[in-house]
Amino acid sequence: MNDPGAPLAAGDRIELRFPARGDLVVLARLVTSAVATRAGFDVEELEDLRLAVGELCLLALQGSDARHGDLRLELTLLGDGVAITCSLERASTTGDTEPSADEMEAAHLSEQILTALVDEHGRQSEDGAVRAWLRKRRRELAG
Protein backbone atom coordinates (compact mmCIF):
# COMPACT_ATOMS: atom_id res chain seq x y z
CA MET A 1 0.00 0.00 0.00
CA ASN A 2 1.37 3.43 -0.92
CA ASP A 3 2.04 5.89 1.89
CA PRO A 4 0.07 9.09 1.06
CA GLY A 5 2.68 11.15 2.90
CA ALA A 6 5.69 9.62 1.16
CA PRO A 7 7.91 12.04 -0.73
CA LEU A 8 7.70 12.11 -4.49
CA ALA A 9 10.73 10.88 -6.39
CA ALA A 10 12.46 11.56 -9.68
CA GLY A 11 10.37 10.30 -12.58
CA ASP A 12 7.02 10.72 -10.81
CA ARG A 13 4.52 12.53 -13.05
CA ILE A 14 1.29 14.29 -12.12
CA GLU A 15 -1.24 15.58 -14.64
CA LEU A 16 -4.14 17.99 -14.11
CA ARG A 17 -6.66 18.87 -16.82
CA PHE A 18 -9.26 21.62 -16.34
CA PRO A 19 -11.36 24.06 -18.40
CA ALA A 20 -9.19 26.86 -19.78
CA ARG A 21 -10.59 29.67 -17.66
CA GLY A 22 -8.52 32.27 -15.87
CA ASP A 23 -10.48 31.83 -12.63
CA LEU A 24 -9.50 28.14 -12.49
CA VAL A 25 -5.74 28.76 -12.69
CA VAL A 26 -5.83 28.62 -8.89
CA LEU A 27 -6.20 24.83 -9.29
CA ALA A 28 -2.87 24.68 -11.10
CA ARG A 29 -1.25 26.71 -8.32
CA LEU A 30 -2.67 24.47 -5.58
CA VAL A 31 -1.59 21.24 -7.25
CA THR A 32 1.87 22.66 -7.93
CA SER A 33 2.25 23.69 -4.30
CA ALA A 34 1.21 20.25 -3.04
CA VAL A 35 3.53 18.43 -5.44
CA ALA A 36 6.48 20.73 -4.72
CA THR A 37 5.99 20.29 -0.96
CA ARG A 38 6.15 16.51 -1.30
CA ALA A 39 9.17 16.85 -3.61
CA GLY A 40 11.18 18.68 -0.93
CA PHE A 41 11.10 22.30 -2.12
CA ASP A 42 11.48 24.89 0.64
CA VAL A 43 8.85 27.54 1.44
CA GLU A 44 10.42 30.26 -0.72
CA GLU A 45 10.75 27.88 -3.67
CA LEU A 46 7.10 26.82 -3.21
CA GLU A 47 5.94 30.41 -3.48
CA ASP A 48 8.13 30.98 -6.55
CA LEU A 49 6.61 27.91 -8.22
CA ARG A 50 3.03 28.91 -7.35
CA LEU A 51 3.54 32.32 -8.95
CA ALA A 52 5.42 30.88 -11.92
CA VAL A 53 2.69 28.34 -12.71
CA GLY A 54 0.09 31.10 -12.75
CA GLU A 55 2.17 33.00 -15.31
CA LEU A 56 2.77 29.79 -17.27
CA CYS A 57 -0.99 29.23 -17.57
CA LEU A 58 -1.51 32.84 -18.68
CA LEU A 59 1.14 32.39 -21.39
CA ALA A 60 -0.61 29.25 -22.62
CA LEU A 61 -3.94 31.11 -22.79
CA GLN A 62 -2.55 34.11 -24.69
CA GLY A 63 -4.00 34.65 -28.15
CA SER A 64 -6.71 32.01 -27.93
CA ASP A 65 -10.43 31.73 -27.54
CA ALA A 66 -10.16 29.27 -24.69
CA ARG A 67 -13.84 29.14 -23.79
CA HIS A 68 -14.07 25.66 -25.26
CA GLY A 69 -10.55 24.51 -24.54
CA ASP A 70 -8.74 22.78 -21.73
CA LEU A 71 -5.50 23.48 -19.94
CA ARG A 72 -3.36 20.44 -19.23
CA LEU A 73 -0.73 20.87 -16.56
CA GLU A 74 1.95 18.20 -16.37
CA LEU A 75 4.47 18.13 -13.52
CA THR A 76 7.44 15.77 -13.79
CA LEU A 77 9.84 15.33 -10.90
CA LEU A 78 13.50 15.48 -11.86
CA GLY A 79 16.44 14.41 -9.73
CA ASP A 80 17.15 18.01 -8.76
CA GLY A 81 13.82 19.75 -9.34
CA VAL A 82 10.67 19.81 -11.40
CA ALA A 83 9.65 20.31 -15.03
CA ILE A 84 6.18 21.76 -15.61
CA THR A 85 4.34 22.01 -18.91
CA CYS A 86 1.06 23.80 -19.50
CA SER A 87 -0.68 23.02 -22.79
CA LEU A 88 -3.79 24.62 -24.23
CA GLU A 89 -5.85 21.95 -25.98
CA ARG A 90 -9.06 21.98 -28.02
CA ALA A 91 -9.22 25.78 -28.28
CA SER A 92 -9.37 27.96 -31.35
CA THR A 93 -7.17 30.96 -31.96
CA THR A 94 -8.75 34.40 -31.77
CA GLY A 95 -8.50 34.74 -35.54
CA ASP A 96 -5.99 37.58 -35.36
CA THR A 97 -2.67 36.44 -36.71
CA GLU A 98 -0.79 39.18 -34.87
CA PRO A 99 -1.17 39.61 -31.10
CA SER A 100 -2.44 42.96 -29.88
CA ALA A 101 -0.15 45.39 -28.09
CA ASP A 102 -1.84 44.49 -24.79
CA GLU A 103 -1.31 40.77 -25.38
CA MET A 104 2.33 41.34 -26.28
CA GLU A 105 2.87 43.45 -23.15
CA ALA A 106 1.16 40.83 -20.95
CA ALA A 107 3.28 38.05 -22.46
CA HIS A 108 6.45 40.09 -21.99
CA LEU A 109 5.58 40.71 -18.33
CA SER A 110 4.84 37.00 -17.78
CA GLU A 111 8.18 36.09 -19.34
CA GLN A 112 10.03 38.59 -17.12
CA ILE A 113 8.33 37.13 -14.03
CA LEU A 114 9.22 33.60 -15.11
CA THR A 115 12.85 34.61 -15.71
CA ALA A 116 13.02 35.90 -12.13
CA LEU A 117 11.37 32.81 -10.59
CA VAL A 118 12.61 29.73 -12.46
CA ASP A 119 15.77 28.34 -14.03
CA GLU A 120 14.43 27.87 -17.58
CA HIS A 121 11.19 28.55 -19.42
CA GLY A 122 9.75 28.78 -22.92
CA ARG A 123 6.63 28.85 -25.07
CA GLN A 124 5.82 27.23 -28.41
CA SER A 125 2.77 27.65 -30.60
CA GLU A 126 2.14 25.38 -33.55
CA ASP A 127 -1.04 24.66 -35.53
CA GLY A 128 -3.22 26.29 -32.87
CA ALA A 129 -1.69 24.28 -30.03
CA VAL A 130 0.16 26.25 -27.37
CA ARG A 131 2.68 24.78 -24.93
CA ALA A 132 4.45 26.76 -22.21
CA TRP A 133 7.04 25.10 -19.99
CA LEU A 134 9.40 25.74 -17.09
CA ARG A 135 12.07 24.00 -15.07
CA LYS A 136 12.98 24.80 -11.49
CA ARG A 137 15.78 23.21 -9.50
CA ARG A 138 15.75 22.85 -5.73
CA ARG A 139 18.35 24.79 -3.83
CA GLU A 140 20.50 22.51 -1.77
CA LEU A 141 20.62 23.29 1.92
CA ALA A 142 23.93 24.78 2.93
CA GLY A 143 25.75 23.04 5.65
Image (spheres, rainbow, N blue to C red):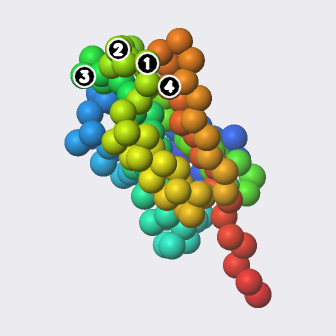
- Which badge, 4 or 1, comes first in the chain's sequence? 1
CA gap between label 2 and label 1 equals 6 Å
The residue tagged 1 is: 97
- Which badge, 3 or 1, comes first in the chain's sequence? 3
Q: Kindly check if marks 4 and 1 are in contact, taking CB atoms under 8 A apart as contact.
A: no
Q: Is residue 85 left or right of residue 138?
A: left
Q: Which labelled disc corresponds to residue 67?
A: 3
Residue type at the position of mark 4: Val
The residue tagged 2 is: 95
Of residues 75 and 90, the one drawn nearer to the viewer in this rendering = 90
Q: Secondary structure at mark 3?
A: helix
Badge nearest the viewer, 2 or 3: 2
CA gap between label 3 and label 4 equals 15 Å
Residue type at the position of mark 1: Thr
Residue 54 place in picture, x, y as percent: 40, 49
Q: Secondary structure at mark 1?
A: loop
Q: Residue at x 59, y 29 (%)?
A: 124
